[in-house]
Amino acid sequence: LSPFKSSLISNSIIFALFFTGYILAQLPAGILSDYLSAKSLIVLSLVGITITSVVSAYYVSLMIEYITSFFMGFSSGWIYPITIKILSNTFSGKDLPLAMSIYSLAWPTSIVASGIIITFLALRFSWGTPFYFIAILSITLAILSAFFLPSIKVHSQRIEIKTLISNKSIIFIAIGGFLFFLS
């Protein structure tokens, strides 16, 4: 289906570039969401996904796909820390774990849905159609977020990196998350 005849290696590079961008966004997203409006950051993130999706669909080139994959991952990487910030400031007590568990269904559900929806759109219409579909969904969600998300700013205390990397709970959670994506 891909017009630039991607290979297993190029597909692996695209995947790796996406998650490299995703990883690099995590720390600045977490820090900035403490000081800037979470709503503004999530809207910008969704606009980034919109732009990179349109560029991926419109410019049919493996090099462009590499570049947009990195920036799509970077744009997507802002969503998780910001969402955690919004959830932890919106819910408390027994409601917080429930809200977190509902949110954590988004990842596996999106993977299942993409296998069905993206494949259908690409086979039925064209290779670029799924990218346009994602762009439409992203810009729609960005607009809705701009109007309906609360503008949350939280000035949290400064956390020492040494404290984080020596905390056993964080280490085990991080290893579990690593194994989740590795599998």
Image (spheres, rainbow, N blue to C red):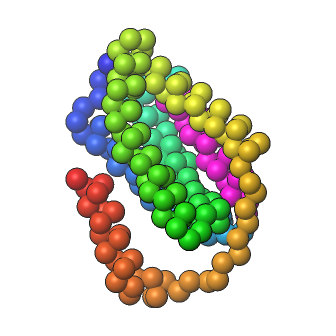
Rendering coords of residue 24 (x, y %) = 48, 60
Relative to the observer, which residue lies in front, 170 or 72?
170
Rendering coords of residue 54 (x, y %) = 56, 28
Q: Is residue 126 visible?
A: yes
Residue 177 forms part of the magenta stretch:
no
Residue at horizontal 69 percent and vertical 44 percent from the top:
145
Q: Would you identify the image quadrant in which residue 12 lies?
A: top left
Residue at horizontal 42 percent and vertical 14 percent from the top:
126
Q: 154 left or right of 50?
A: right
Relative to the observer, which residue lies in front, 82 or 67?
82
Relative to the observer, which residue lies in front, 182 or 108?
108
Q: Would you identify the image quadrant in which residue 8 lies?
A: top left
Q: 76 left or right of 154?
A: left
Looking at this view, name the residue that lies furthest to the front: 94
- Would you say the magenta stretch is mainly helix, strand or loop? helix
Residue at horizontal 49 percent and vertical 83 percent from the top:
161
In the displayed structure, 114 sits above or below 173; it is above
Q: Is residue 55 visible?
A: no
Q: 162 left or right of 156?
A: left
Rendering coords of residue 164 (x, y %) = 45, 82
Rendering coords of residue 87 (x, y %) = 59, 60
Over which residues does the magenta segment extend? Answer: 36-56
